Image (spheres, rainbow, N blue to C red):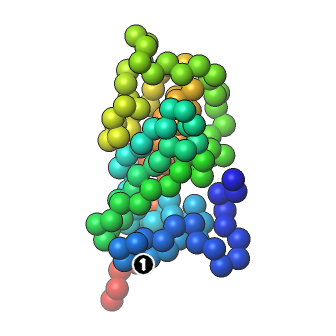
Amino acid sequence: MNSEPTGDEVLKECASCGNGWSTREEFLEDPDIILIGYQAHFEELTSGLFLFNHVCGNTLALFTEQFTDIYTGPIFKQCKVDTDECPGHCLYEDDLSPCPVECECAAVRDIIQIIAQWPKWEKQVDS
């Protein structure tokens, strides 16, 4: 899936206030958007959801698939959830910690860190 819409498409629109973002970068750079969680989908990792709060109070969800291209590190084949090695980060929606285990879910945990550190643009102050 292409993470960048073309033409008049909108990447995401807030159902509460109607604010919209045309590109993933515009969405991530918005200081009114804050990453608050991740809902794992263990059968199909790209179907997991990143959860963001918008300043209006609404929570917005975007599929993991929309962010996979920002990660260039290793992707491990084996899922280690529910093993002795797993620290369980993916089991808790609000746990945004990185994972040190060589698990297929570790790449998503690294994407979380990239999103959390994404530079935000400065808000304009009205005079």
User: Residue 83, percent across and down?
Assistant: 43, 13
Is residue 24 visible from the viewing direction of this image? yes
Which residue is located at x 71 percent, y 71 percent?
6
User: Residue 24, percent across and down?
Assistant: 57, 61
Q: Is residue 7 above or below residue 78?
A: below
As drawn, the residue found furthest toward the left would be: 57
Q: How many labels does the image show?
A: 1
As drawn, the residue found furthest toward the top would be: 84
For residue 20, side relative to residue 15 (left or right): right
Quadrant of res 71: top right
Which residue is located at x 41 percent, y 32 percent?
90
Where is mark 1, residue-wise? 18
For residue 97, side relative to residue 5 (left or right): left
Label 1 sits on a secondary structure element that is: loop
For badge 1, the amino acid type reads Gly
Is residue 113 visible from the viewing direction of this image? no
As drawn, the residue found furthest toward the front would be: 43
For residue 56, side relative to residue 120 (left or right): left
Near-viewer residue (126 or 8): 8
Which residue is located at x 59 percent, y 19 percent?
78
